[in-house]
Amino acid sequence: MGVDINFIGIKRMKTRWGSCNIRDRRIWLNLELIHMPEGCIDMVLVHELVHLHERNHNARFYALMDQFMPDWQRWHTHLKRKGISAE
């Protein structure tokens, strides 16, 4: 994906599946992802990595999601049904 990160960690999060600190290039993934299909984990990780290319959820962001993971919407929908934001 052409990005460098300084840290990826796992922790419990109540309201998000993942988060990205763009300045520190640090990504956190929700521990509860371990109970989800692998595609969901991949989608959250790609989503957070794409934020290192594009900060906002805009057309460019979603074009990059399509480029790096063409079936991301399938997994996003699955996670939305679980009630925590993928964003």
Image: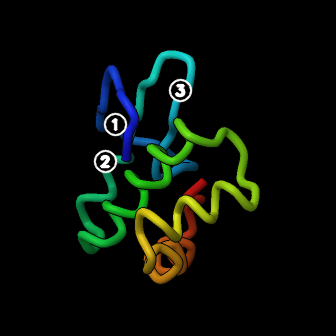
Which of discs 3 and 2 lies nearer the camera? The answer is 3
Q: Is residue 11 left or right of residue 72?
A: left
Q: Please say if the residues under marks 3 and 2 sit with CB atoms less than 8 Å apart.
A: no
Location of residue 71 in the rendering, given as x and y in whole percent from the top left corner: 43, 80
Rate crowding at label 1 as few (under 14), some (14 to 19) or many (20 or more) other CA atoms within 10 Å. few
Q: Which mark is residue 11?
A: 1
Are dots 1 and 3 in contact, CB under 8 Å? no
For mark 3, does the 10 Å Cα neighbourhood hold few (<14), some (14 to 19), or many (20 or more) residues? some
Say whether disc 1 or disc 3 marks the residue closer to the N-terminus: 1
Identify residue type, mark 2: Leu
Residue 9 is situated, as x and y percent measured from the top left of the image, at 30, 32
Q: Find residue 31 and name its label.
A: 2
Is the C-beta separation of discs 1 and 2 under 8 Å?
yes
Q: CA distance from mark 3 to mark 2?
A: 18 Å
Between discs 1 and 2, the one toward the N terminus: 1
Return the mark for residue 21: 3
The residue located at (51%, 39%) in the rendering is: 19
Mark 1 and mark 2: Cα distance apart in space: 5 Å
Taking the view exactly as shown, the residue that stands out farthest to the top is 24
The picture places residue 53, in percent across and down from the top left corner, at: 56, 40
